[in-house]
Image (tube, rainbow, N blue to C red):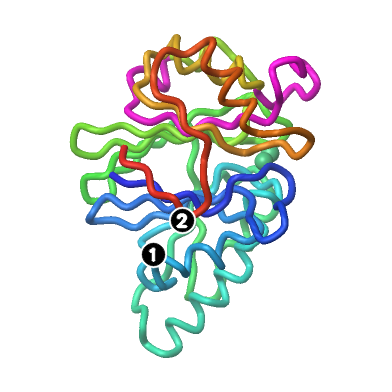
């Protein structure tokens, strides 16, 4: 599996950048994970909308869904011009009233996901776990071949999350706070907490993302490296990471 970062900022994008969005490519699937502000402009540097097999939304905060409306239109146009035959499936929790907007004419279709559902999309296994956050957020585990990728979406630190990401090859982890900001926002993690999660879960690589705006993000990696022995990367826009 390969993961390309399409957006990496929390809350709002930096100039010319984007909030949460990732393209997962297994070789057989092209999956968009979250669709924040500015994500489509980056997605289209890599693929066309009709190449997408499915979309997964972690939660309905705007920094994870802001570009979804335009994706519905792109899909409508692709189907109108016969570049796409089947509706684009958008998987998300059904707890938010915006879930009903995911089904748009016969062009896109919203399907519910929750922690009791395990999907198997042509060999790609996907499971979910609710996290501590001020909107219902689902972390996601993607398993393909013998590789495992876990994406946290937004979450506060919780020890009972270790099991969900045990021995992941790549943990894509939100890091919204610096080490000395612990407790500032309950539903987000500091660099130390992200690294502690990676260490306790014994993951191979930690990709830090969902960055804060207030300070130098390179300090997040420096802080994390004190608590995690594995490989740590800061998400870079349009960069592809091998899982
Ligand atoms: Zn967010
Ligand atoms: Zn959020």
Q: Pointers 2 and 1 in contact (CB under 8 A)?
A: yes
Q: Residue furthest bottom?
A: 81
What residue would you read off at disc 2?
Answer: 55
- Where is residue 213 shown, x and y percent of the image? 75, 39
Label 1 Cα crowd, 10 Å radius (few <14 / some 14-19 / many 20+)? many
Residue 171 magenta: yes
- The residue closer to the viewer here, 89 or 169, is 169
Q: Which corner quadrant holds the N terminus?
A: top left
* Mark pair 2, 1: CA separation: 8 Å
* Front in this rendered view, residue 73 or 148: 148
Residue 209, image quadrant: top right
Q: Nearer the viewer, residue 232 or 122?
A: 232
Give the class, few, some or many, for how many residues have Cα within 10 Å of label 2's Cα (few <14, many ≥20).
many
**Label 1 belongs to which residue?**
52
**Vertical placement of 49 versus 63: above or below?**
below
Residue under the point 23% across and 56% down: 28
Task: For the C terminus, give its image quadrant.
Answer: top left
Q: Quadrant of ligand 1?
A: top right
- Label 1 lies in ligand 1 vicinity (Cβ under 8 Å): no
Magenta part of the chain: 163-189
Residue 71 on image: x %, y %: 55, 69
């Amino acid at each position: 599996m390969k993961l390309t970062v399409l957006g990496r900022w929390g809350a709002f994008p930096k100039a010319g950048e984007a909030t949460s969005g990732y393209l997962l490519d297994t070789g057989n699937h092209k999956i968009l994970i979250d669709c924040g502000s500015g994500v489509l402009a980056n997605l289209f540097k890599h693929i066309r909308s009709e190449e997408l097999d499915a979309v997964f939304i972690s939660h309905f905060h705007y920094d994870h869904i802001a570009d979804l409306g335009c994706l519905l239109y792109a899909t409508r146009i692709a189907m109108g011009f016969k570049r796409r035959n089947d509706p684009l499936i958008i998987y998300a929790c059904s707890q938010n009233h915006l879930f009903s907007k995911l089904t748009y004419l016969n062009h896109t279709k919203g399907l519910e996901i929750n922690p009791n559902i395990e999907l198997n999309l042509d060999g790609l296994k996907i499971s979910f776990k609710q996290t501590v956050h001020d909107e219902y957020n689902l972390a996601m585990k993607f398993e393909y071949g013998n590789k495992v990728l876990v994406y946290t979406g937004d979450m506060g630190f919780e020890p009972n999350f270790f099991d969900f990401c045990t021995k992941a090859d790549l943990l894509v982890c939100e890091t919204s706070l610096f080490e000395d900001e612990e407790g500032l926002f309950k539903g987000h993690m500091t660099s130390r907490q992200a690294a502690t999660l990676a260490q306790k879960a014994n993951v191979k690589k930690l990709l830090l993302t969902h960055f804060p705006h207030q300070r130098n993000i390179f300090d997040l990696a420096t802080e994390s490296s004190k608590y995690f022995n594995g490989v740590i990367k800061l998400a870079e826009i349009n960069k592809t990471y091998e899982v």
